[in-house]
Every structure is written in structure tokens, then in C-alpha cells.
Image (cartoon, rainbow, N blue to C red):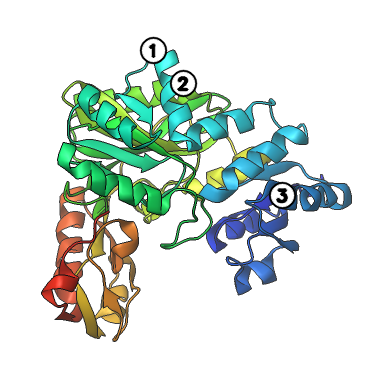
Amino acid sequence: MSPAPTVLLIGGVDAHLERFAALGAKVVLIQHPDKVTAFQAGTADVLLVVDYTDWDTVLPFAEAARSVYGVDAVVSLTEPGLNPASRLSDLFGLSDGRRYEVSRRMRDKWLMRRHLAEQGLPVPHAALVEGRASLDAFGERAGYPFILKPLSTTAGFGLLRAEDPGDLDRVWARIQELDGGRTDRGSTMFTVDGFLMESYIDGPEFSVEALSFAGRHVVVAVTEKLVDEAHFAELGHAVPARLDEGDRERLTGAVEAFLTAMGVIDGPSHTEIRLSGRGPVVIESHNRLGGDHIVELVEAAYGIDMIAYGAAWPLGLTEPLDASPAPLAGAATRFVLREPGTVTAVSGVAEVAARPDVIAAQVSVRPGDTVRPLRDNWDRLGCVVVRAADTDGAVELCEHLTQSAIRIDVEPAEPSAARPVAA
């Protein structure tokens, strides 16, 4: 029998480690001090607790792990671990030597836009924020509204929308407040390292979940997104997206061309894209699995465990998918939202979670907590994830459960406190 392969796993959640353990792999886990769980401590063969987002800190630990235990693959399936994992993989000779270059392009939105433009793919007008005057200049060139976003954060943190020239002082003040600091909502593992301006892209928004096998991209699912133009919080997801075949082919073809142009070779990807008036335009993409329970939706609707593929493929322990799978059911998630104020009571969560058609149900608030005005994903209060016969049924059930079956009583905030905070 051949010895079990050894993976150097950079960060991640319990489910990631669980899949590697199920493969019989030896797992050397490098985990951030803020993210260690009891499951990880008991399951990893070796656990090294360091801030892996700091290259000078993680490098000597990774080199020591490789020297002592041997490493067959360096993998990360979580956003803050992607760059260090790819950089280590290149350094250890476990990739084609370009994995870090590709990962940096995927994570840095400005690098991504420049590269796509060089490759001749459609991109919106884009420019770096370089002082207050650059906002005026961009508005004159690209028109209003336009979008501003940190170069490499996640989950909608720090996204801004400039409505008109009179809105630019507010936008500039918020940029100055955030730039150079750490994210302070949901996670502190990202640094705000500059802002990008982009022209607004119209049209319905989707995400495309894919797996790449030695340069061949297989779309596993197209996810329908529920968004609201008034803020940057995603309100729900559903698979399969309710699209006609022509629009689906346009979206998947655009994403396959995008992944090829970006140099993505292996592993999972999650690409956010709009079907705009001038055709499909990629908003952003990630060389990792989608969040917001999208992997659970995909497994419920298609029977494909994308986490398992993300773990097994780099170790050579699975065969590639031949083609996109056919849907077996519909699945959806909707997020629990309430008006700003103070939570006075929470009920119904356990009853919803016990239903056979519910995959997950959770809330993150309890009596006494503050409900903030909705700005981004960190302001949502919880979610329900369901499976049904088709997408329509899943969406209808999900909306009923989040709005009626889960009860969160809120004492309204004073009018001044309830006014949305400038995002």
C-alpha cells in the first residue's frame, strides 16, 4: 500500500478538514489563532497556530512542517489562505510556478481588471483611487452612479456607491476612514489596501460555481442571487438559477473564458457575474468555494460535494468531472432580516431546523443585541437553507420560513439611530 499523502492545509473551517480526514490524508493544519476549533485540534494530525496571513511569520513554520513531515500538496479553500498557500506551493515546487501569480490576480481586483483588459475580455471602466480629485475625474469619465471597493476584502466590506458629484465628499470621507486598516466586521483577517473605482454594471446578478481540472473548467452550477440596489448585502441564493438555456450558456461561456484568461488551472472557483445590457460582465471572482452556504445548495441540488473535490483533486485522489451535472432538485437560502433596533425575543429556530426539508437554520442574535441598518453581509441576522423539488418551491419555502416561522422581535430604534449609516 502507498503511504497516505500529506497535505499542508492553510486555514479553513471544520468541513474542509473533515473532507481531508475522510480521504485518509495526513493533515498538517496551519490555523490562525482566532479560528482554531475543538474539532480542528482533535482531527488535524499536526496543528500549528500562527497568523498565516503574515508571510514572514508563516514561512518558517511551513518550511519546518515540510522538513519534518513531508508535504505532497499545499491547499487552502478559504479566502485569506489562498495567497500564502499558492506562494508556498510555488516555493516547494508543487505547482507550475505560477500559482501565486494567478491567485494574486484573482484576489486583487485592480490586477484582475488590468489583466482582463489586456486579454481583450469585457471590463467596466476602472481606475485606482489616488486622492480626492480622482473621484471627480472618474465620475466625469464613467458617469454616475459608480462603485468603489477595497482591492482585496470580501463579503461586501467597504463597498461604496457614488450617486452623483454631490455624494463624493461622503465617499471620500469613508475611504479615508477605512483605507490602511483591518476589516472590523465579521473578520479581522483582511487589510484594506487601497480602493478601486468601477463603472456601474446593470442587470441581474448570478454566481457560477466551477471546478477546474488541469486547465479544463467544468461548471457545476449557476446560482441565482437576490440583491437590492439600495445596499451591498446579498439577500439570498437559489440553484439551479431560473434561466433560459441561451442565457445560461452565455453566462457559463463567459466564466469559462474568464478562468482561462486569468490562468486558473485547478480547483474550485466562485465567479460573480451580471447579465448586463451589453452581455455578461464578471464582477469579481475567487479561486475558492462560494460562501453563504452555496456549497450546501449545490450538493442538495446536484449531488456534487465541491468541498470533497477541492480536497481530493490536489492529492490525486479523485477523477475529474466529465461534464456539468444535471439538477436533481432545487435548493435555496434566504437571509433573516429585520428593521434596526434592539432584539427583545427570538423563537422558532429549532422548529425550523428540525424540518426534513431544511438543511440549515440559524440566527446570530439574541435578546439585547442591536440590529444595525443593512449595509453588507455582516448585517444579516441568520439564514435558512432548504431543498425542494425545484427552484420555485425552494425559494417559496425559504421566504416563508425566514419571514414567518422564525420570529425575531425588535424594539425599533430611535429615528436618528435607524437612519442608514453611510456605507
Does the CB distance between marks 1 and 2 fall below 8 Å?
Answer: no
Type of amino acid at the residue the image marks with label 3: Leu
Q: CA distance from mark 3 to mark 2?
A: 30 Å
**Which residue is under mark 3?**
8
- Asked if 27 appears above or below 417 in the picture, the reply is above
| Number of residue marks | 3
Question: Which amino acid does the dot numbered 2 rest on?
Answer: His
Where is 217 relative to 358, above or below? above
Q: Residue at x 60, y 39 (%)?
A: 313
Nearest to N terminus: mark 1 or mark 2: 2
For marks 3 and 2, the one nearer the N-term is 3
Give whichever of 124, 253 is nearer the camera: 124
Quickly name the residue at label 2.
115
Q: Nearer the viewer, residue 121 or 174?
A: 174
Quadrant for residue 220, please give it: top left
Label 3 sits on a secondary structure element that is strand
Farthest residue toward the right? 68
Q: Which quarter of the picture shows residue 184?
A: bottom left
- Residue 62, horizontal then vertical, whole percent: 77, 49
Q: Nearer the viewer, residue 297 or 251?
A: 251
Q: CA distance from mark 1 to mark 3?
A: 36 Å
Q: Nearer the viewer, residue 66 or 377?
A: 377
Residue assigned mark 1: 120
Disc 1 and disc 2: Cα gap in Å? 9 Å
Decide if residue 130 is on the left or right side of residue 391: right
> Where is residue 125 shown, x and y percent of the image?
30, 24
Mark 3 and mark 2 in contact? Answer it, CB < 8 Å.
no
Q: Amino acid at mark 1?
A: Gly
- Asked whether the viewer can see residue 164, the reply is no
Q: Secondary structure at mark 1?
A: loop
**Which of the labelled discs sits on residue 337, or is there none?**
none
- Of badges 3 and 2, nearer the viewer stands 2
